[in-house]
Amino acid sequence: MTDVPGTPAARIRRFLRSPSGGASVLLLASLAGFALANSPWASGYTALVTTPVTLSVLGARGPENIDAWVSDGLMTLFFLVIILEIKKEIVSGHLASPRRVALPLIGALGGMIVPALTYLLVTCAHPEATRGWAIPVATDAAFTLPIILALGRHVSRGARAWLMALAIFDDVLGIVVIALFYGGALYWPAMATAVIVTAALIGANRTGIGTLWSYGIGCVLLWVALLASGLHPTLAGVATGLCLPATTSGRRAGQIAPLDRAASALTPFVTWVVLPLFGFMNVGVSLAGVHSDMMLKAVPLGIMLGLLVGKPVGVFGATLLSTRLKIAALPAETPTGMLFGLSLLCGIGFTISLFIANLAFSGSDLVTPARMGIFAGSVLSALAGWLWLRFSPGHDRFQDVP
């Protein structure tokens, strides 16, 4: 039975299937979290997101509250889904060559180096602030990607694939920075377990195993091992997505590939549950006690400029340089103007940036100013990127993502 076009049921179905639908729900959930954090019900909101939820079997490093379970647990599925999309593009899409894979990786590296240098330049006269050099280096894929999906025909498919890959490379590099410069001591037995589980997932791929439950069990085991090791557990989603077969074996010809089955099963849950929960809990930054003069101090100003200026300069500059040197090639139907708009969106740095700020300034009164810099830089980057891509001429001829 099909819906009659123009009826409420048809409009609802179209909204649920559209990329902009999920982005709209994420935006509304994020605004709700921010509004509650700055309302008379702020204490209730804080109590909700910090509600203790623990599993003794995970030990001392396990998530301790609802917020941590969303950020460290459910967001693993988000990274898994994004990796599946990128792998599909690498196998048969806009990233199906080493030069096109190199482009987002080089852009991600440039987008880490220049913001860090920008921050250090602003804070060089304040030794206590320099520990936060890595705060503006990360791009938040959870907020960046829904924005480009909501832009629809204003962004080409090749540009979407490039930004998806860059955001993932950026997040993985950010997690590596945390492990190297801000992490505690690694627990090597758990690291060894993670290596063994990853090897088993690779072996399952090589031998043609296509049952999703095999990779699901592997993902859970890898998540637990990474959690115990001291590394960020969402890397389990990245590793599992890379190991899922993108094609079917000869004896299963005509069947849907494991990668496509996993993406079809997980994408609705990630879009309508995981991302709205993540936005609701992570954008709830309280502005209590904040005044305009605070933004001119070294830490918030360095972070804001790192995200708003350093990030697009690093991403855009490194990307253009790599194409001029013939190291990599631009995605199809991606003019330099569109590339610049997408580079502006790379300044959205909520999640990993907030995480690094808490680690860098733990127990210090610089945590709140750092959060203000992250919030201001991310919001301004989102607005600048959206306005550029939405209203720049010549960016409205591309087809929407189905």
Image (cartoon, rainbow, N blue to C red):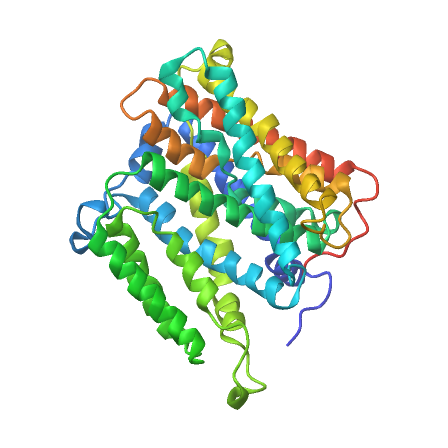
Snapshot quadrant of residue 220: bottom left
Image quadrant for the C terminus?
bottom right
| Residue drawn at point x = 45 percent, y = 18 percent | 299
Q: What residue sits 29% from the left and 26% below the top?
A: 362
- Asked whether residue 225 appears in the rendered view, the answer is yes
* Residue plotted at (64% across, 46% down): 148
**Can you give x and y, in whole percent of width and height, for residue 174 in the image?**
44, 41
All told, the count of numbered labels is 0
Residue 245, above or below 339:
below
Left-right relation of 369 to 359: right
Say which of 319 and 263 sits in front.
Answer: 319
Residue 143 lies, in percent from the top left, at 54, 43
x, y percent for residue 327: 67, 49
Residue at the spot x=60%, y=42% of the render?
A: 107
Please tell me whether residue 223 is drawn above or below residue 183 in the rendered image: below
Foreground: 343 or 15? 343
Q: Foreground: 344 or 3?
A: 344
**Residue 286 visible in the picture:** no
